Image: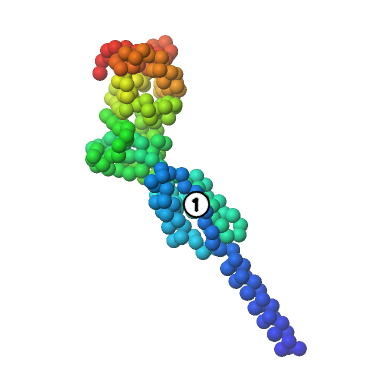
Amino acid sequence: MKHKGIILISTVTVFILATVLSLVWLFKIRHVEISVVAEVSQEIETYEKVNAVIEANYKGKSFFSVSEDDVKAKLCQDPYLNVKSVKKVFPDRLQIEVSKRKERFAFSYNSEYYVTDSEYYLLKKVTSEDQLGEGIIKIFLEQITIDVETLVLGQKIGAENGALVGYMTEIFSRFSDGLNLIEGVTVMGAKNWIRFNTKTGVVIEFSFSPSNPTVSEGEQSAEATALVGKASEVESAYHGLSEYQKRNGYLLVYTKANGEIAIEHVTEHAV
């Protein structure tokens, strides 16, 4: 009887181990579906880049040990990858959707260019204008102080890097056709101005100077928010200009002494 009990226990143990090993073998990441949105010339390269990360870090691992958040974080180490979604599909599949970020802007600061996509995610840093691609909109930061430690690859450039910088990115984002409307931007810290040079010639200028010297810090912040909120209206005002006005002068946006926001075209303007 004693030997029969040992045999029974051994048999059950072997069965359990075999079952566990079978389950471990069965529930592994075996199949990866990668969907890529990119320019045709970059689709294969982007796919291979994503697949290489998955092959090296997750293919063949236990389905239950792989975290969707971890996969996303690993892929996002490449600032050019915009990871739309990562999904585990039981029992052995990963579904990944990514897009390739496109270089759109170059922030000029301290003789260096910080290149971002259309959502201002920092993609790379270069030291010469010659290293910029065609069609990149240059954004010049004048009399602006930025802690370069806040300019991190894969993270956004915006309000965290300076109030005026944040206002500029928000205004541009609110233009419905900013990439075709604007040729270049200058953020002027000392004057509290943001100048958008249009492709037709007229300069769209937002003045963030307070309406009067007595306004509180909170009121000044509210005025700035209201100015940013006028971006769509300013764009409409631009389209309402005559062809001559679109090529000349300034479209000024500022807060009057009574708190009202003015949007007006002038031929000449103090620089």
- Residue depicted at 30% across the width and 43% down the height: 125
Whether residue 173 is visible here, answered yes or no, is: yes
Quarter of the rendering containing residue 10: bottom right
The quadrant of the rendering that contains the N terminus is bottom right
Residue 198 is situated, as x and y percent measured from the top left of the image, at 33, 23
Colour option used:
rainbow
Residue at the front extreme? 40
Q: Is residue 41 left or right of residue 188?
A: right
Which residue appears at 73% of the width and 84% of the height?
A: 5
Q: For the image shown, how many numbered marks are present on the structure?
A: 1
Residue 35 in the image: above or below residue 211: below
68 vs 269: above or below: below
- Residue 167 visible at all: no
Residue 199: give x, y in percent of width and height.
32, 24
Q: Position of residue 173 (x, y in %)?
A: 42, 30
Q: Secondary structure at mark 1?
A: strand
Name the quarter where the C terminus is drawn. top left
Q: Residue at x 58, y 68 (%)?
A: 25
Q: Position of residue 166 (x, y in %)?
A: 39, 31
**Residue at (36%, 31%) from the top-left corner?**
165
Reading the image, the residue beneath label 1 is 34
Q: Where on the picture, by quarter, is residue 170?
A: top left
Residue 200 sits in quarter: top left
In the rendered structure, which amino acid carries the disc numbered 1? Ile
